[in-house]
Amino acid sequence: MTTATTVPSHDTDWLIVGGGIVGAAIAWGLARAGQRAMLLDEGDDAFRAARGNFGLVWVQGKGLGHPAYARWTLEAAAAWPAFAAELADRTGVDVELVRVGGMTMCLDDDELAARAGALASIRDAVGIDYPFEVLDPGALRERVPQAGRDLAGAVFCPLDGHVSPLRLLRALLQAFVDAGGVLHTGTRIDRIEARGGGFVAHAAARAYGAGRIVLAAGLGNRSLAPMVGLRAPVVPNRGQVLISERVQPFLRYPTLHVRQTGDGGVQIGDSKEDVGFDDGTTIDQLARITARALRCFPLLAGVNIVRSWGALRVMSPDGLPIYEASTRCPGAFVASCHSGITLAAQHAGALVAWMRGGAAPAALAAFGSERFDVQAA
Ligand SMILES: Cc1cc2nc3c(=O)[nH]c(=O)nc-3n(C[C@H](O)[C@H](O)[C@H](O)COP(=O)(O)OP(=O)(O)OC[C@H]3O[C@@H](n4cnc5c(N)ncnc54)[C@H](O)[C@@H]3O)c2cc1C
């Protein structure tokens, strides 16, 4: 058996460190392209946004002040239907993509005006089709009859949608393994060496060698990236979420704070809290989240909550993704983002094509870590 001291030559062509939604999408993209790839995931004790998120494939509002991010998100949303269909075809797993548009419900006129203004500004900056509608209370209730009577309205974007994030993770991992990928769970990588034109990733029990390595370890990227000349200054940001018992279908459109899942449960979210690595829940935040949901959908007053949880977002200093190829250690890449569900199709497609040596997608220039030096200056 290989140990951490007897370093293997190349076990595979690609190592992907981190089997959350970003690592799984990249791993699947590589295996689909016929690459030999091995996915190393820390496992159940790790922080995993992939297992605690809200499941939105969301366009509206992404990229205010950052048109490259808005365009990257638009491309990802457009790629989603084919991506979901291919996963279903290959694995039999329906990720429950619903792409009928999404709503941001607004409690008062100021909220509605701010939201509409933000979307108008993104539309003007992206320079491509960026459809949305501002709905007054009457128009909102025409589309969502169960909406609260005292809402100011909503902003609707026809490009928004949602999926089952757990089904997505399962489908990606299954598709990866079915395409010949090797998955090691319970494998935490503590150290990475660039050696002999490749990389050696050290876990407690053994080491893994490959010619190329992709760091997709979520919050773990922060400490791993500098080992191969990269940077990922990501920090945790907690979101608390609740889910209800199953109820009759009542909500056709996903909304930013409330969505009805494929099995009828109502998912309600979420908070944005700077509390370090605490992924617990608090009564005050759950009460605030629930109060907002009740104003949006008063019918929820009679519905039982069955579960709540906290999960940690993977946040960069400016909230944008970080994608970078190492110049000090060629063959090493880092990928971090806080919209891993929305961007999954891009990660499996355009991002993997670039990592394999293809042309860099236009948006990529905006996502290198050198931008943090400019921002600091
Ligand atoms: C409350 C909440 C709601 C969200 N809602 C949405 C949404 O609606 N839509 C959307 O697009 N995004 C949403 N997100 C964000 C989305 O979940 C994340 O962008 C995504 O999960 C990040 O994926 P990741 O793979 O980078 O990190 P994670 O999902 O956190 O996974 C990281 C993985 O790396 C592994 N790992 C860590 N360190 C190591 C190591 N040293 N060695 C080996 N493995 C390691 C862990 O085991 C883990 O599996 C939400 C997040 C939260 C918290």
Image (cartoon, rainbow, N blue to C red):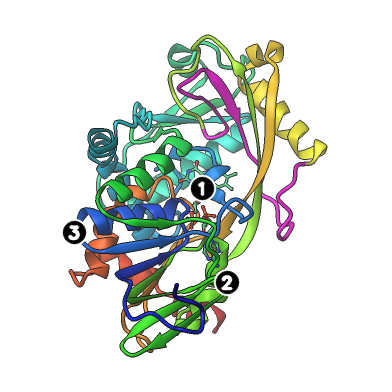
**Mark 1 vs ligand 1: CB under 8 Å?**
yes
Is 286 placed left or right of 124 in the picture? right
Number of residues whose C-alpha sits closer than 10 Å to that of mark 3, classed few (under 14), some (14–19) or many (20 or more): few
**Quadrant into which the N terminus falls:** bottom left
- Is residue 176 positioned above or below 81 on the image? below
Between the C-alphas of marks 1 and 2, the distance is 24 Å
Residue 14 in picture, x, y percent from top left: 31, 69
Between the C-alphas of marks 2 and 3, the distance is 29 Å
Prevailing secondary structure of the magenta residues = loop
Q: Is there CB contact under 8 Å for labels 1 and 2?
A: no
Q: Nearer the viewer, residue 209 or 6?
A: 6
Q: Is there CB contact under 8 Å for labels 2 and 3?
A: no
Question: Which residue is at the far front?
Answer: 1
Front of the two marks 2 and 3: 2
Q: Which residue is mark 3?
A: 34
**Mark 3 vs ligand 1: CB under 8 Å?**
no
